[in-house]
Image (tube, rainbow, N blue to C red):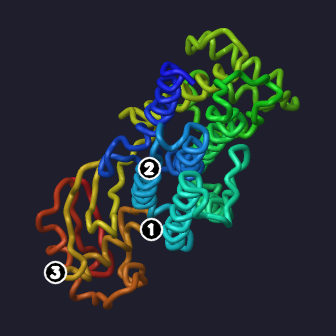
Amino acid sequence: MGASDESDRQEDGSRFRESLIEHLYEPPLPHLSLEQAAFNLGFACRWIRMPVRLCWNLGIPLYDPEYDISKLVDRIDDFLLVLSGRLHWNVFDRLPTELEKTKKQLLILVEACREPWRYHGIRVDRWKIPWGNSHRRLCILADAGIPPADPLHPLYALGAALGGFVVALQEEMPPQTVAGLPRFPLDLEDLPDFYPVASAAARTPAWLREAVPLLGTIADRAGGDGREWDRLGDLGAILDAAVEQLGCRDSFASITVEEMVDRLCEDIFMALRSPSAGPGDILPRWCSRGGKLYYEGEEAREIRNASNVKIVKIVAAFQKASWPTRLGLAEINEIEGPEIYREQVSDQVKSLNKGLRFIRFSARRGGDAVEWNRQ
């Protein structure tokens, strides 16, 4: 294999990292909206397999996946923090543990690729990676996190479908290190089924389909008019639309599908990042692990749990209840921790308001309830 081939493979691996994964790292935690976190969580839980696949296909000297795997795990933790008030409590408690198990398994697979003689229990087969059960359990658990009735669920489902398709598409490509063979296009028949993406697109909110026209085109092909999905015909029509709307190359080669999906994901990431995206994240958000209260992406106050147990209890109760304007004392006391008595509410609210920006809390009905309002 010549130097130019090596350079092409290096560039190909970098493109995969830079075209999609960079969008998972932006914006930073305080500025993440609920809509972004829901889509990104679904996408990242599937995409976390990609570094191992690239390692298998491109070779360790050209691509070092440990960094991407570790950073993706940290980023998924950010998404969980943002969604803590919307995820089922059992899922929120169990996902970090399952995520660590998945990380451990993926790193073992990387080592098996690097030094196969040290991992006799794992067969290093460049056409079939022995993923194990950790990643499958992670995805099943994440899928159960956001209830189907939640408005965020369609965004999560779209992210999961796109992330799964991107990984499946790469898994269909021949390894580039086998006998020095270059990447070659696949026929449409060899591509993963695009229907899960189209079906998820059809359930997304109208504002997102308007912001990303190709997503609307894909949704229209999902069979909402009563007809059945035509795996080859509908994908071909979507590719035709992509050529026109995104300027992709006029070819049915798999690289065109790759380009189309990359651009589609990028446009969705950017649409969700736009200040006008959807209803917006205008509710406060309490991140218990970091001990910080956010409002509209800005830090409103840091609260140290050890010295402000009852204050933390108040904001945790509002977070659990998805931030209603008023919350009764009985509901606040359902949160684990020392009981707050009616005569203590006023003093606790005053303490909570010290150093607080953007919003204010107030005691109501003689201490029987607590309200919050924007300043």
Which quadrant holds residue 149? bottom right
| In-image side of 56 versus 84 (left or right) | right
Residue identifier under label 2: 34
Question: How far across and down, in percent of the image, does residue 170 sit?
Answer: 65, 36
* Image quadrant in which the N terminus is located: top right
Question: How far across and down, in percent of the image, does residue 167 sit?
Answer: 63, 41
Which of pointers 2 and 3 indicates the residue nearer the eye? Answer: 2
Question: How far across and down, in percent of the image, does residue 299 sit?
Answer: 22, 55
- Find numbered disc 2 in the image and state the secondary structure of the residue it sits on: helix
Residue identifier under label 3: 347
Query: Callout 1 environment at 10 Å: few (<14), some (14 to 19), or many (20+)?
Result: some
Q: Please, what is the three-letter code of the amino acid marked with disc 3?
A: Asp
Residue 306 visible in the shown view: yes
Mark number, residue 38: none
Vertical side of 329 occupied by 5: above or below: above
The residue under the point 44% across, 69% down is: 320
Q: Please, what is the three-letter code of the amino acid marked with disc 2?
A: Leu
Query: Callout 2 environment at 10 Å: few (<14), some (14 to 19), or many (20+)?
Result: many
Residue identifier under label 1: 321
Which of pointers 1 and 2 indicates the residue nearer the eye? Answer: 2
Q: Please, what is the three-letter code of the amino acid marked with disc 1?
A: Ala
The residue under the point 24% across, 50% down is: 298
Query: Callout 3 environment at 10 Å: few (<14), some (14 to 19), or many (20+)?
Result: few
Vertical side of 237 occupied by 301: above or below: below
